[in-house]
Amino acid sequence: MPIYAYRCAECGHCGEHLQKMSDALLTSCPVCKAEKYIKQLSVVALQIKGVSASAPRSGGRCSPACGAGCGHS
């Protein structure tokens, strides 16, 4: 189930909500109750079972092509 980011145009509250893609958009801010809660564009993050994106598979070292700035040497 995707996590959607919302921001209230009235009070500035930001929140993330786990919703089905078929669920209706949220419109009411949980803090100030204004009907100005707007879904934001956000970056997609995927998690695949059994694979860790933070653990390189090359013996604990990143390849020179990594370029991700992960701090491994």
Image: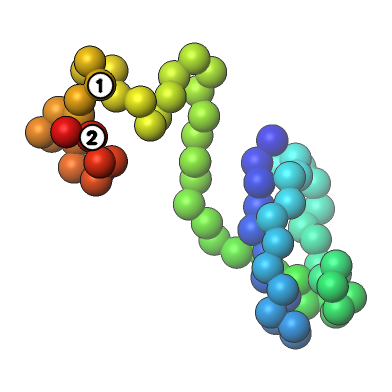
Q: What's the mark number on residue 72?
A: 2
Query: Contact, CB < 8 Å: mark 2 with mark 1?
Result: yes
Name of the residue lying farthest toward the right: 33
Which residue is rendered at x = 39% and y = 29% of the image?
A: 53
Q: Which percent across, then down, holds residue 2? A: 65, 41
Q: CA distance from mark 2 to mark 1?
A: 7 Å
Which amino acid, mark 2? His
Which residue is rendered at x = 80% and y = 61% of the image?
A: 26
Q: Nearer the viewer, residue 40 or 66?
A: 66
Which residue is rendered at x = 75% and y = 71% of the image?
A: 37
Where 15 falls versus 23 (above or below)?
below
Residue 36 in which image quadrant? bottom right
Label 2 packing within 10 angstroms: few (<14), some (14-19), many (20+): few
Q: Which percent across, then down, holds residue 9? A: 70, 81
Q: Secondary structure at mark 1?
A: loop
Q: Secondary structure at mark 2?
A: loop
Question: In terms of sequence position, does the residue under pointer 2 or pointer 1 come before the other?
Answer: 1
Q: What's the mark number on residue 60?
A: 1
Where 33 falls versus 40 (above or below)?
below
On screen, residue 22 versus residue 57, left or right, reads: right
Q: Which percent across, then down, holds residue 30? A: 85, 67
Number of numbered callouts drawn: 2
Which residue is rendered at x = 66% and y = 52% of the image?
A: 4
Q: Nearer the viewer, residue 61 or 16?
A: 61
Query: What is the quadrant of the N terminus in the image?
Result: top right
Name of the residue lying farthest toward the left: 64
On screen, residue 24 versus residue 12, left or right, reads: right
Where 35 falls versus 4 (above or below)?
below
Where 68 falls versus 27 (above or below)?
above
Which amino acid, mark 1? Gly
Q: What's the mark number on residue 10?
A: none
